[in-house]
Structures are given as structure tokens and as C-alpha cells.
Image (cartoon, rainbow, N blue to C red):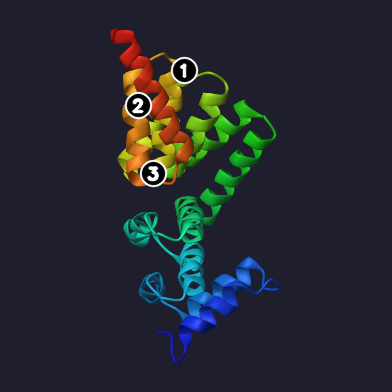
Amino acid sequence: MSVGNGFSKLAALMYTNDVDEDNLRQVLSSKYTESDLVNYLKNEDILVARAAATALGLIGSMNIVPVLVKNLKNNDYRATVNTETSLWNIWSRSGNDDVDTKLNVGKQHIESEKFSEAIEQFAEVIEVAPTFAEGYNQRAIAYFVIGEWEKAIEDCQQTVKLNPYHFGAYAGMGHAYLRLGEVGEAIEAYQQALNINPNLISIAKVIIQLRRVLEEGKK
């Protein structure tokens, strides 16, 4: 448990620039529990609430994902941005360092536009950790980029089966359905993403545009 004025110390710690991430994670783990940080999400001091959202991304587990998803509806925009980043951080941790390394290598392949190598790398992640949702989500991204939209949808579906809060996979599914010309399915997937994360403004705009297309098609 944190002691004394732990919440103000948390804000000071998170906004210190000369602490590397590994050391910061160790310090956070030694001073705060997940429960502490969850409580600080509701702190009246905006900086503390924002710091808690970021800190949970460093040391939080999948257990606190529902709480972070709820915090995506926070009135403070900066807090929602920090929360979204933290969710992605948590989703990218399998609990196995070797698996996480493979996942990161696959991401690097995507950035380098080595999509075949990325798909092979994510396949290894899935083979070793078949219940790790992010392995499927990242492979879906690679499939999408090379135009394998059906395969991308299959991997997105598996992602949300394992992690129902994964707004990124729902959004990706919508993109793939749209490329296939399946507008109704795209809208449904996009709406699922928006229901989880109402800050996806670009997705909201696409939904409006697609609904107009459907309405015009009925005339």
C-alpha cells in the first residue's frame, strides 16, 4: 500500500523525465498496488488522475482492463488519451518475455514493411501463446495491409473473442469489411469499437458517412 501523501508523489514521479521506463516500473510496483492506482483515477487533482492512468499501463494486469475501459469516458480528454495508451500497453504484455519479444519483432517487421516476415512472427506468437489476443490482432494488421481482408477479419474476430474490450480489433474488422464492400457489417464492427471507446472520432465520422450511403441506396 502507498503511505502518506502517496497520490501527490505519484504525480511527481510520473512527470519526472529522467527516469527510464524499467526503473519507473520497479518504483511503481514497490510503492503502489493496482488498487491504489485505480483509486487515484478518481482523484480530484487532474494531474494525479492522469498519472494513475499512465501508471496502470506500466504495471497493470488484464484484471484492471474493465476499469480502464470505463475511464475512456472520463471528462478529461488527456486522461482518456493516457488510458487508451495504457490499454494498448497492457494488451501487448503476455506475461512471457519470450512471447513479448516475438510480438515486438513482428511489429518491427510491419514498420519495415516486411509483412510476410511479420505474419510468420505472429504465427509463432500464436503457436506458443494461443490465448494471447494481441498476437491475432497484430497478424490481422499485417493481413490487412497486404489485402488479405478475410484473414484479417478472422484474426480480429479471434482477438475480440479473447479480449472483448479490444476496440482496435473491432475497428480493424470494420476496415476489412469495408474493403470487401460489406457496409452493414463494417458499420456494426465500427459501432462496437465506438461503444467501447467513444473517443474514436474518425470512426464515428465513418459510421455517419456509411449510414448515409445505405440510406441513399434505399432511395
* Point 39% across, 77% down: residue: 36
Percent coordinates x, y for residue 96 in the rendering: 48, 55
Q: Give whichever of 167, 124 is nearer the camera.
A: 167
Secondary element at tag 1: helix
> Of the residues shown, which amino acid type is indicated by label 1?
Arg
Point out the frontmost of discs 1 and 2. 2
Q: Depth check: give the residue in front, 197 or 150.
A: 197
Say which quadrant the N terminus sits in.
bottom left
Establish if 79 lies above or below 148.
below
Picture disc at residue 166? 3
Residue 172 can be seen in this image: yes
Q: Residue at x 54, y 51 (%)?
A: 100
What secondary structure is marked by label 2?
A: helix
Q: Would residue 126 be seen by someone viewing this image from the given angle?
A: no
Left or right position of 199 against 117: left
Q: Residue at x 43, y 15 (%)?
A: 180
Residue 59 vertical placement versus 127 (above, below): below
Few, some or many C-alpha atoms within 10 Å of disc 2 (few <14, some 14-19, many ≥20)?
many
Going from the N terminus, do you reach mark 1 or mark 2 first? 1
Q: Dividing the picture into quarters, in which one does residue 103 lie? A: top right
Q: Residues within 10 Å of mark 3 (few under 14, many from 20)?
A: many
Mark 1 or 3: the one toward you: 1
Spatial distance from mark 3 to mark 2, Cα to Cα? 16 Å
Residue bearing the label numbered 1: 179
Q: What number is the disc on residue 18? A: none
Residue 105, given in percent of the width and then of the height, sits at 62, 43
Location of mark 2 (residue): 187
Q: CA distance from mark 1 to mark 3?
A: 21 Å
* Amino acid type of the residue that numbered disc 2 sits on in the rendered structure: Ile
